[in-house]
């Protein structure tokens, strides 16, 4: 009986340790309250409250906190923080904390076989969905149904990333002609 209870305690501690977020050092510079997304070929740069994320090989002048690589057929999306690499199979999540800003990255089933990434910044501050594969324009309105609460989609369109604000009722895509950042602020839920 004692061995069983001890084994259960050790197993519970291991699960709790796995669920603990990875903590990154806080930035010494002032943290802007809003964020931006800049499309860059097939990738994008995402900045939010001190975070810098690169998606699918986007080049950055500063060292990113997180490098994300979308899923390919039969492969899970990849996450790299410093020297640590982590695969994100469907229905798995990885949580990070930098200063007092949280980031949760979840791999969800996509419309095809490749997983879609959902980035949750803060406590429901802003949500970005990143499908691994292209989506036909007529299916854009379905993104809000498939990913409720997502504020922005980073879509692959004609071989490059574009930004589609969700929930606004209009399907206007940004980033097709320019590399200007799409700016956003915290969303009150």
Image (cartoon, rainbow, N blue to C red):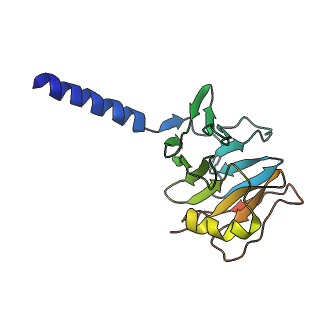
Single out the residue that lies furthest toward the left: 1
Front-most of 147 and 13?
A: 147
Direction from residue 100 to residue 64 in the image, left or right: right
**Residue at coordinates 65% horizontally, 58% vertically from top-left?**
34
Residue 141, placed above or below residue 150: below
Residue 71, placed above or below residue 14: below
Q: Specify the quadrant that holds the N terminus.
A: top left
Residue 135, placed above or below residue 43: below
Q: Quadrant of residue 79?
A: top right
Front-most of 103 and 26?
A: 103
**Residue at coordinates 57% horizontally, 32% vertically from top-left?**
86
**Residue 2 image point, x, y percent:** 11, 24
Direction from residue 66 to residue 101 in the image, left or right: left
Single out the residue that lies furthest toward the top: 3
**Residue at coordinates 35% horizontally, 34% vertically from top-left?**
15
The tally of labels here is 0
Q: Quadrant of residue 136?
A: bottom right
**Residue 146 image point, x, y percent:** 57, 63
Front-most of 130 and 102?
A: 130
**Residue at coordinates 76% horizontally, 66% vertically from top-left?**
137
């Amino acid at each position: 009986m004692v061995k069983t209870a001890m084994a259960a305690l050790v197993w519970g501690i291991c699960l709790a340790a796995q669920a603990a977020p990875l903590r990154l050092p806080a930035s010494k510079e002032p943290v802007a309250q809003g964020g931006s997304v800049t499309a860059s070929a097939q990738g994008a740069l995402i900045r939010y409250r001190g975070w810098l994320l690169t998606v699918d090989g986007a080049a950055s002048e500063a060292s990113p906190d997180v490098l994300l690589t979308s899923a390919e057929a039969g492969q899970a999306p990849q996450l790299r923080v410093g020297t640590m690499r982590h695969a994100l199979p469907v229905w798995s999540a990885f949580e990070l904390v930098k200063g007092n800003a949280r980031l949760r990255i979840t791999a969800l089933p996509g419309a095809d076989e490749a997983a879609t990434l959902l980035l949750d910044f803060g406590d429901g501050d802003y949500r970005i969905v990143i499908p691994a594969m292209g989506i036909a324009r007529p299916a854009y309105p379905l993104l809000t149904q498939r990913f409720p609460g997502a504020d922005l989609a980073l879509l692959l369109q004609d071989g490059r990333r574009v930004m589609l604000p969700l929930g606004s009722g209009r399907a206007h895509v940004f980033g097709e002609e320019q590399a200007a950042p799409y700016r956003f602020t915290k969303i009150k839920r």
